[in-house]
Image: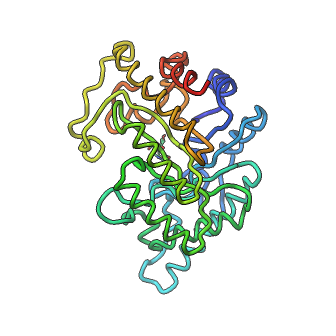
Amino acid sequence: VRDVRSAPDAELLRRHFNSITAENVMKATTIGVSEGVYNYGPADELVAFARANGMQVRGHALVWHQTAPAWFFAGDPAAADYRATVQRRLERYVTDVVTHFRGQVYAWDVVNEPASDGSTTWREDSPWYRALGPDYVDIAFRAARAADPDTKLFINDYNTEFAGKRGRLMSIVDAALSRGVPIDGVGHQLHLQLTTPTAAQVEQALADTAARGLMSHVTELDISIYDDPGSCSASRTGCATGYPSYAEIPASVLQTQATRYGELFRVFRRAQNLTSVSLWGLSDLNSWLETFPVRRVQAPLLFDEQRRPKPAFTAVAQSIA
Ligand code: 9MR
């Protein structure tokens, strides 16, 4: 969620959800002001809301290339102690943040999006990878485990439902596990398009995770009302044309979306080791997809722009009844 201070959003949360995730305020761009200086205010507010309403909190995300403040990497990369300095800052950050929320966060996305979309295994343009190489994952997970032995530690990525991306992520996971790195589970973001990928592909991703003895969490589920070619997210070209207004989204599109939500939740119900499902947003009033990859009308969630249940909500409710 973006903001628990909105009364109608709070009402919707209380009524339908038992776990909440901060869309942004637990990221290092909010919390990590500078070395040893933290802004916990907004996250503490969210945790207090959850506690007051008997809900649990899922932590997102300690280490992510898109939310990595420059102070972590300050200094001369050629200096003899540069690597040790960045490692120390990372360890301190993870230790302090996980300690702050100890006992209040049941799972953390410790590392977000480490795998490449291309031919390499790792996302090599991440500042974390550039400074520390693959070791950054080990360092972050070990620090998190030491700070809170009870919270579950996740590696989270998108497109895990596609065999190629999943293969790259799992090779990172398998290698880390063989070194004894304390990874408890894989987070599957599941930002889906209107008709792809299929529920069967999602089921395979969950099965591959369970086969490793790992837990799965669905961490950021939403279903776009468009089908775009790969060029749309890669270079903002070829994106489907947006509908002129929310009211003009065809009913058939919302029905297709509903059917897919229903199929997915049936998969979730029967999956092994899947213990948490989060949607990436609350209602169609606020979604990151309104501006990504391009600005256009979107309706990716279970509640509409007036927070009323959509056909997708009914489909989910029926499939988990
Ligand atoms: O939805 C989030 C958006 O409001 C933020 O501006 C953005 C950058 O922090 O992150 C978005 O959430 C991302 C999530 O943290 C990780 N997976 C992809 C999500 C969509 O970009």
Residue 84 placed where, x, y %? Answer: 55, 80
Side (left or right) of 35 relative to 202 = right
Number of residue marks: 0
Q: Nearer the viewer, residue 54 or 65?
A: 54
Side (left or right) of 232 relative to 10 = left
Residue 195 placed where, x, y %? Answer: 34, 31
Which residue corresponds to the image point at 51% horizontal and 53% vertical from the top-left? 156
Name the outermost residue toward the bottom. 80
Name the outermost residue toward the left. 238
Q: Nearer the viewer, residue 25 or 174?
A: 174
Query: Which of the 4 quarters of the picture holds residue 44?
Result: top right
Q: Nearer the viewer, residue 82 or 228?
A: 228
Question: In the rendered image, which quarter contains the N terminus?
Answer: top right
| 131 to 60, vertically: above or below | below
Query: Which of the 4 quarters of the picture holds residue 55?
Result: top right
Which residue corresponds to the image point at 44% horizontal and 78% vertical from the top-left? 76
